[in-house]
Image (cartoon, rainbow, N blue to C red):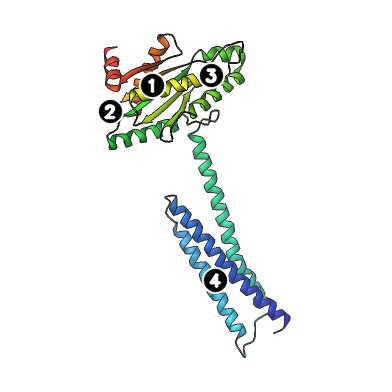
Amino acid sequence: MTQTETIFVTARICIVTLCLVTVLVVWWHARTDADRGERPRLLMGLTIGLLLSASLLTLNDIHAALSPGEQMATYDGAWLWLLYDAGVPLLVILALRLMRQRSAALTALERASVTDALTELANRRGFSTAAAAALQACQRRGETAAMVMFDLDRFKSINDGHGHAAGDAVLRGAAAALRRHVRASDIAGRLGGEEFALLCPGMTTEQAAALAERVRDEIRRSVPHPAGDGAVVTTSAGVAVVERPQAGFEGALVAADQALYAAKKAGRDRVAIAGSLEAADAATAAA
């Protein structure tokens, strides 16, 4: 073979290798999507078929070119077809990369829509969605759940007296303190302002109250007050056991919020227990 023919055959072999490597990449990404619960798209199957077809056609060209008595097609048009064949796997790789970037952007956007940017806890939308699903799971298992509401005492005076930057630092510190005391199965969120919520599947009233006390103490000890001079950040909390998970997320919030109001009324910096959702419903009806 001439040097030109050798280069031509080598280029064909490289194209086959590139096609097969691209098939493996596409297959791996399709399997990863399946592991995440996403069905591999029909496009992936068609892409693998196209790449395998290109590999077989290129191998056939190599075989024909190396057969005895055959004239190897190294004219200008053949080189153009060579570039076209090489472009197929390269375009597939580029398209796959763009699809991955789009998927990552959508995932980041979805996460941002349910996450509070300041504290990195779930926002109200994210918390309500996750809590509602957790309550449904508790209902299926026949378990109770506990809802805890936290509210930073006199937070408005921190914002007004020391600025919003100082208030934001207190909120981040309180969120970090809360995060240190929750289990993997618990759902924590910032509902807005200085109000936080925690849903604890499978917890009793006593267990949730003890957890709320630990969080209250942690915030008092670890979150510095911008005023200094012995000033401390205090927290009030309301605990309600949800004995009827089918009552839903809003019902659980009502029960815990009533207990929180009782803690505020009793002097702040304490944990109050509503008891059960039934008791909270009766109190609401009486009011």
Question: What percent of the width, then of the height, locates residue 215?
Answer: 46, 22
Estimate the spatial distance between the alpha carbons at disc 2 and disc 1, rounded to whole Å: 19 Å
- The amino acid type found where label 3 is placed reads Arg
Looking at the rendered image, the disc whose residue lies closer to the viewer, 2 or 3, is: 3
Q: Quadrant of the C terminus?
A: top left
- The amino acid type found where label 1 is placed reads Ala
Q: Residues within 10 Å of mark 1 (few under 14, many from 20)?
A: many
Asked whether the viewer can see residue 254, the reply is no
Read off the residue under disc 4.
54
> In terms of image quadrants, where is residue 227?
top right
Which numbered disc flags the more N-terminal residue, 1 or 4?
4
Question: What percent of the width, then of the height, locates residue 236?
Answer: 44, 16
Label 2 with label 3: CB-CB less than 8 Å:
no
Read off the residue under disc 3.
221
> In terms of image quadrants, where is residue 257?
top left
Estimate the spatial distance between the alpha carbons at disc 4 and disc 3, rounded to whole Å: 67 Å
> In terms of image quadrants, where is residue 243?
top left
Read off the residue under disc 1.
209
Q: Secondary structure at mark 2?
A: loop
